[in-house]
Amino acid sequence: MTPIVNKKWIVKESGNPVLVRQLAQELGIDPVLSNLLVQRGIKSYDEAREFFRPDLGMLHDPFLMVDMQKAVDRIDKAVSSGEKILIYGDYDVDGTTAVALMYIFLKSVISTDRLHYYIPDRYDEGYGLSYKGIDFAHANGCALIITLDCGIKAIEKVKYAASLGIDVIICDHHLPDSELPAACAVLDPKREDNTYPYDDLSGCGVGFKLAQAYAQTHGIHKDKVLELLDLLVVSIASDLVSVTGENRVLAYFGLKQLNSKPRKGLESIIKLSGLDKHLITIDEIVFKIGPRINAAGRMESGRTAVDLLVSGDDESARKIGDEINVHNNERKSIDREITIEAIEMVRNEDAFAGRKSTVVYNPNWHKGVVGIVASRLVEAFYRPTIVLTKSGGFIAGSARSVAGFDLYEAIESCSDLLENFGGHMYAAGLTMKEENFEEFSRRFEEHVASKINDETLTPIVNIDSYLDFKQITPKFFRILKQFQPFGPGNQSPVFLSENVYDNGNGRCVGSDNGHLKLELIQDDSAYLPISAIAFNKSDHFEHLHAGNPVDICYSIAENYYRGLANIQLRIKDIKDRDDLF
């Protein structure tokens, strides 16, 4: 894939210099680090201490969430009257971890013969609470359904469940419509009448708060709930919710458990991902653990992922983990093939020349990877993108946007051509009749072209601070690591270093030699070279190999090789010294 090279670099405005100096002195840290704190809204020693030292005492009272007492009371009724419960969740990482979390918690208070879990089929049922799932509950004698990571818009389906004598508790985190389903409890921190102090929990996070509330009510030891945090951090990372506030606390302690005592199913995935030799970070969940869990729903059935996450012995965890890993390898192979086909289609067909959007369709593409392919096309061409395939007599697919462009609005402008659609500003799904494809593609492009500008079509690298290599000391890196866990709202800092050189040992690496492995020095050659990796940047090799200076923007990470850890720069972009920002 040819990378975008004309990225715009924007260095953030520095924090208040008085506060920066004060925090640097009080904390005994480099002003670059204190500036990072001030940029994150941290203005005092006490706030910095809270940031660097998350505490479980910072978690909010679950009963501050509207309908929490109703939800606990309804579960009480089910437990005391011998009812069966169906735990229902979406097929992605957030949904499957949420179902596993609730199942593991409830089996400590109710016998497993009264507990069922259900994951809808991505292709047959689609997202959310389904009629088929409700029929499954009815056929198995369940009087209560607990939905996780879905259900907030299931008005007609909740009515259908009620007609069969089934109550529903909804645990969701998506934005509701003005009308809520008539469930016996609707837990969603994004409700208009929300009273909960933090509104960006994952779907699994809402389930965690329900477990926390039930445990508090019944005197169940808090450790019974806290041991679920390894599942919760996987959902927080994979669903890309903010790693701020309560989520930061939950992710911090979830990572501790994931690294020290993960449950059997997660341990199996950790080993298959090659992450069992060092500390796991949020990024490694996003890029290595999450995709494997997701692969079950993409290629086969999301239920397999729950089977893995609730498994209690090494042998079954290993067996299911191996099966999921096969699915993930298959997913990667299909994803790679379709991405290559789609890129060639855009490059070679005249119809795409000069367009502000990318809409591609092939009836033979696998529906389970079209969202991934759409993201890859955005990386390659940096345009609002829709990837479609044939599905159940219709055309269906996924859409991804670029920073600052409202994709949902663009799709909504063509809603008369669609059977259904849903999503948000940056990602969406849609279904249409095949005969509407050409007109949809034309009108979508027309809308995008009328709303988007060249600035929006230029990818941006946001840079936190300038940094000299001589400032990257062991102490600097030790404190920088304490800014973790990174994620939305607390991204890994990006630094800009000017006038750096490869020391002559740089080389192209990777299966297609598309990446650069570098040993970089700055103009002061008294300092040892710093290891760096630049993915998809091999086009800079000749320039660097000739000894020419460049400016780089990068994050700083820890690289593990043969059991040893060392500092490594993860380069995001490279500019020749004569390039303008």
Image (cartoon, grey):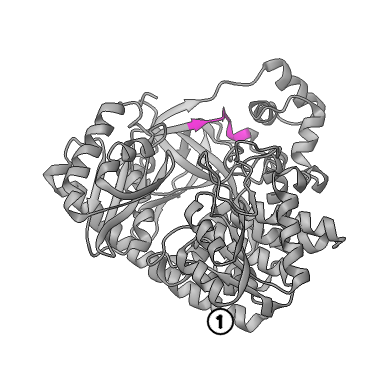
Q: Residue furthest bottom?
A: 315
Task: Specify the quadrant of the image occupied by residue 39.
Answer: top right
Q: Which quadrant is the C terminus positioned in?
A: top left
- Does any portion of residue 237 appear in the rendered image? yes
Q: Residue furthest left?
A: 350
Q: Nearer the viewer, residue 579 or 231?
A: 231
Residue 413 image position (x, y, % from top left)? 30, 36
Q: Is residue 172 left or right of residue 356?
A: right
Q: Is residue 42 left or right of residue 143?
A: right
Question: What residue span does the magenta drawing correspond to?
Answer: 462-470
The residue wearing badge 1 is 319
Q: Give the residue at x 52% y 71%.
A: 303
Residue 83 image position (x, y, % from top left)? 69, 72
Please check the rendered image and state whether residue 488 is part of the magenta-colored stretch, yes or no: no
The total of numbered circles placed on residues is: 1
Q: Which secondary structure, mark 1?
A: helix
Task: Specify the quadrant of the image occupied by residue 95.
Answer: bottom right
Q: Give the residue at x 25% y 35%.
A: 356
Q: Give the residue at x 44% y 41%.
A: 424
Q: Is residue 455 left or right of residue 225?
A: left
- Does any portion of residue 108 appear in the rendered image? no
At label 1, counting other C-alpha atoms closer than 10 Å, the crowd grade (few under 14, some 14-19, many 20 or more) is: some
Q: Establish if 551 lies above or below 212.
A: above
**Residue type at numbered disc 1:** Lys
Residue 74 image position (x, y, % from top left)? 72, 60
Residue 396 image position (x, y, % from top left)? 30, 56
